[in-house]
Structures are given as structure tokens and as C-alpha cells.
Image: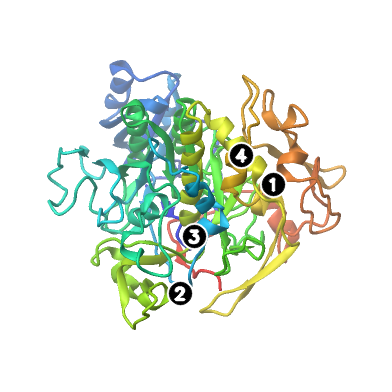
Amino acid sequence: MKRTLVFFLATFLTSGLFAGSGKLAKELESLDPSANVDVIVQFKQAPTEAQHQKVISRGGVHKKSLDLIKAALYSMPAASLKDLSDDPDVAYISPDRAVNATSSTTTMGLDYFREAMNDLTAQQSSWTGQGVGIAVIDSGISNLGDLSNVVHAESFLGPTSTTSASSTMSTSVSANFSTGNIDGYGHGTHVAGILIGSGRHSQNGSYTFGGMAPNADLIDLQVLNSTGSGTDSNVIAAIQRAVALQNTYNIGIINLSLGQPVFESYTLDPLCQAVEQAWQAGIVVVVAAGNGGRNNSAGTDGYGTIASPGNDPYVITVGAMRTMDTITRSDDLIASYSSKGPTLLDHIVKPDIVAPGNQIISTAALPSATLEATYPGNYAPYAIFMPSGGSGTSPYYFQLSGTSMATPVVSGAAALLLQQNQNLTPDQVKARLMKTASKTFPTLSTATDPVTGVVYTSYYDLFTVGAGYLDVWAALNNTDTVPAGETALSPTAVYNSSTGLVGLVFGSNVVWGSNVVWGSNVVWGSSEVSGSNVVWGSNVVWGSNVVWGSSTMQGFNVVWGSNVVWGSGTPHGEGASLAIHGDN
């Protein structure tokens, strides 16, 4: 039994299902008893041979250890799952969900994401990510010239991982590459270019396609093959490896431009448990919000579509903005496909921050990579960046849209902060980025799909833009510190049925509610607008006239969990994703 995990290019992310009762994921309860299924079993303690034997005695086969989350991957008979879930040592059992990716088409334009983020100002002050390691868990990185700082490459696609570090070459890596996995899909290479691209093949042009942190080191952990397919266990194993390599490569950041619909609470979801362990180990985890912002299949107008593991309150969850093909920030708008909060089931306030992700030009992978081969029209024309113009297209640069592209923009910004102060904790990095984010937005904006002509309206509430628009230079100039023992967990949104309003709730020792410097009105803004378009308020964040789409009650029930039942068949398009187009 597999479920879809999608890369967040401009994909139509479907909202997930809802968790079953007890310790067995709901979709495992109705399997054919004669079937075998790959499952991730989380235990209440780190599994030993005794725990493995409990599964093996029920017909299971131990396939992979996931000690980071006190779990393991097994293949076992579906008929034995209920009995295993009753074992007191077992915490939760979920399927090893499928990892799939779909690509996007987009209208060509010249992005200015570094200018919009004030990143070039930072680089001129020597903040380039030097000495900071960033683990990119993606489809691999084809090292074709613009990406010289890939220091370690490891694949999790086969039965055992293959490693390439420094001069040690994996047998699966072509001799034409220095360290790096061949990216047969094209997504990981594009993400890597946004992070560390040198712009080597565009430096004689009128615009250089460089990265946010060009001197950072990349650790390439490949979990997706050339069709964009993999498994949850691959991703968890890669996160586990990043933690193990933390001291070797000074890994300060994990970039996850991927996710899946929410199927259970983040407290049970194995992907969420993995990112939390990385965070606790001192690594900043940056995750794509998803591309469900246009999804009104449940009457929510795209609300409640934040994906896992971006629904975890520890991580930095990133939504996508549009630079509008201009250098100035003042005209930038939200991408209509960027997923919105609150998160399903737990109602965590997400995204945390937004950054440019629409029509981003970055490093291309091999011409035979799936995305490049499928969308050859996305290669960047020489005419848009070479002074001499020309009718051809560059084989080195490719354009994609989605929160996948916004995520490395924030990861790159985090690298600059860690270069500036290597003692910053993940919570301090998250807090500084969110507090200093620009909070100047219009009340609403519209976007038109360039192919279908459909017009989408976006409102600039905190479930759409979070704490605001990333400003790298402002974050680098911020010196506020998070008090010892306090975290930067994203707050929970709570609906008050007596007033019809939604407010924020902060856990104990959470920085946002502790003092004036880090109060919620500082981080999310202080202007409160009554009625249907509530932007920011220090306490009340949503009014009684909630914009959940044309069927308010239906959308309300989906987001807030009232009368939500497990559907039959394939609710909300489980197992499928529909490519959409970048905003015009």
C-alpha cells in the first residue's frame, strides 16, 4: 500500500486523508489480508533484536533500520498488522508511502530572487555561506560546472546506499562528474543551483544566475530516481545520514523541497519525527509548504493544504512568492499555488515565511533528465541574459516554479546566518528569519493561469504568507537572541465556537509569547482587519466571515476537523497529482 509524496514544483497538491484510530494508519486497516505491504514501524524505544523478532515472528522481513526515529522498515503480511499494532512496544505503524514527482510548465521570465531577498547586498559583505554544509535531500545533483561545492554524494535508491566523497567515486557516478549523483530527474540540480550556483555559464551576460550561498558546501543525498519515484523510508534514511555526517561536513541545514499530503498528526507521522530529530540535533530543517493553494476540491480555497513534513511546528515551512520580473520587492506577490495553512488535524500556523519561487531560472541537469526532456521550452533563452541576444537557448539554465524553488532560497539565507554566527541554534535562525521578514503586503491579489486563463484570488493572511517575506539583509543585521530554553515552534490556531473567531495558542517555553521582543504581534504583525479578510492580529487571526470558498461549511469542516470522515476509494485525489503552471 503506497501513498503519494510529491516534489513541490508547480504541482496540484491534494489534501490528505485523516488518521485512523489507535496505532495503525487508517489506510492499513482495509488491506487485502493476503497482501504483503511495506510498513514503517515506530517503537517506543530504539528497536533491538527483540523488537525485530516480534515482527519477523509475524511473517515480517526487516528491510531497513531507521534508528533516528526508533523505527524500522519491514515487509509483512497485511493480516498481521492489527496484531502487531496491539504490541505494547509499538508506537505507530504507517505505510512506506510512495515518493513521486510531477513537472511544471511556465511562462518564461527573468527572475530576480537574489535581489528581492537583498542577498546580493549580503554577498557584497562577504556573506556567502562559506564553511556551512547544506544537505540536499532530492533527486541527486548533476555536477555540470556551476556547482563546484558538492563535497559528498550518496544514493538511497538501491538496496544499499552508494557514497561519493572528495576523490572517492561511487561506481554509480559517471567519471565525467566530480562528486555528485547523476540527477536523472532534474529537480535536485535546479535546487542546488538556487543554493550555490556560481553562474559560471552566464557571467558574461547582462544577468548572472548565481545562488544564494555560492560558497556553501552541498551534501547530495539522493532519494528520487529518474521518474521522480522513491519512498518515505528513503527520505528518512537520508535525514538519518545527514545527522550522522553533521560533524564531518559541518551540516547546518537540511533542504527538503518535497512532501506529501497530511495523513495523520505530525506527532505520529514518521517523516515529521525524522525532521524533528534532525532539528534537535542542531540542524535547521527547511521544508516546502506545497503547491495546493489553488485546490478548492474540498471547498477550502486552498486553505488546509500544507504538506508533511512542512506541517511540523519545529521546521521552517516556506511558501512561494512572485518577483514580477522586477528587481524591486515592493511589487512582489504571492504565487497562487502556494499552499496555505492551518495544517490539517493539528492546526499549526503555516507557512512560516515566503520567498521567491515562481519562474526561477537555475542550473539545468543533463538533457536526458526527465524534466529537461519533457519541457525543453523551459531552457532559458540566451536573449534574456546575453547582451548579444540570439535565438538559441542555453543548455545550462532551466526554469521551474513552485515552493520547491522557494525552499532553497530560505536554506541559502540560513547558511549566511550560520556563517555569520556558527553558534546560532535552529530556533534562533528560524526566529530571526521570521521576525525580520517584510510584512508589507496588499490585502489581496489575483493571478491568471497562463494556459487555462483561470483567475485565482489570494488574501494576505498569516495562513498564506506566514510571518512575511524573507529579507536576508535584515536578518543578518538582527542581533536579537532567543532566551535559553525557549523554542521557536510555530503556534497552533484554535477556533472559538462561542465567538466564531480563531486565535493563536503558544506552548510553554515558546519564544513568540515570552516578551515584547518576540511577541506574536512583532513576528506576525499587529494590524487587525475585521470581517472576511483578516490579515494579522496579535490575538485574533481570523474573523467570523471565513473565506473557505463557495461552500463555507464544507471547507470549515475539512480544515477544522468537524464531521470529517475517512472517505472510500481515493478521496481528494490520493495517489495522483496534476501539473499546474507558474503564475503570470
Residue in the image at 69% along x and 23% along y: 508
Image disc number at residue 61: none
User: In the picture provided, is 42 more to the left or to the right than 237?
Assistant: right
User: In the picture provided, is 452 more to the left or to the right than 151?
Assistant: right
The Cα–Cα distance between marks 4 and 1, rounded to whole angstroms, is 39 Å
Q: Earlier in the sequence, mark 4 or mark 1?
A: 4
| Classed neighbour count for the residue bearing mark 2: other residues with Cα under 10 Å, few (<14), some (14–19), many (≥20) | many
Where on the picture, by quarter, is residue 548? bottom right
Residue 565, image x and y in percent? 61, 48
When the figure is inspected, residue 60 is found, relative to residue 307, above or below; the finding is above
Dot 2 and dot 1 residues touching (CB under 8 Å):
no
Q: Can you see residue 351?
A: no
The secondary structure type at the circle numbered 2 is: loop
The secondary structure type at the circle numbered 3 is: loop
The Cα–Cα distance between marks 3 and 4, rounded to whole angstroms, is 29 Å
The secondary structure type at the circle numbered 1 is: helix
Q: Earlier in the sequence, mark 3 or mark 4?
A: 3
Q: Earlier in the sequence, mark 3 or mark 2?
A: 2
Q: Which residue is mark 1?
A: 560
Image disc number at residue 108: 2
Mark 3 belongs to which amino acid?
A: Gly
Q: Which residue is mark 4?
A: 477
Mark 2 belongs to which amino acid?
A: Met
Residue 444, image x and y in percent? 73, 64
Between disc 2 and disc 1, the foreground one is 2
The secondary structure type at the circle numbered 4 is: loop
| Classed neighbour count for the residue bearing mark 1: other residues with Cα under 10 Å, few (<14), some (14–19), many (≥20) | some
Choose between 1 and 471: the one closer to the eye.
471
Image disc number at residue 402: 3
Mark 1 belongs to which amino acid?
A: Trp
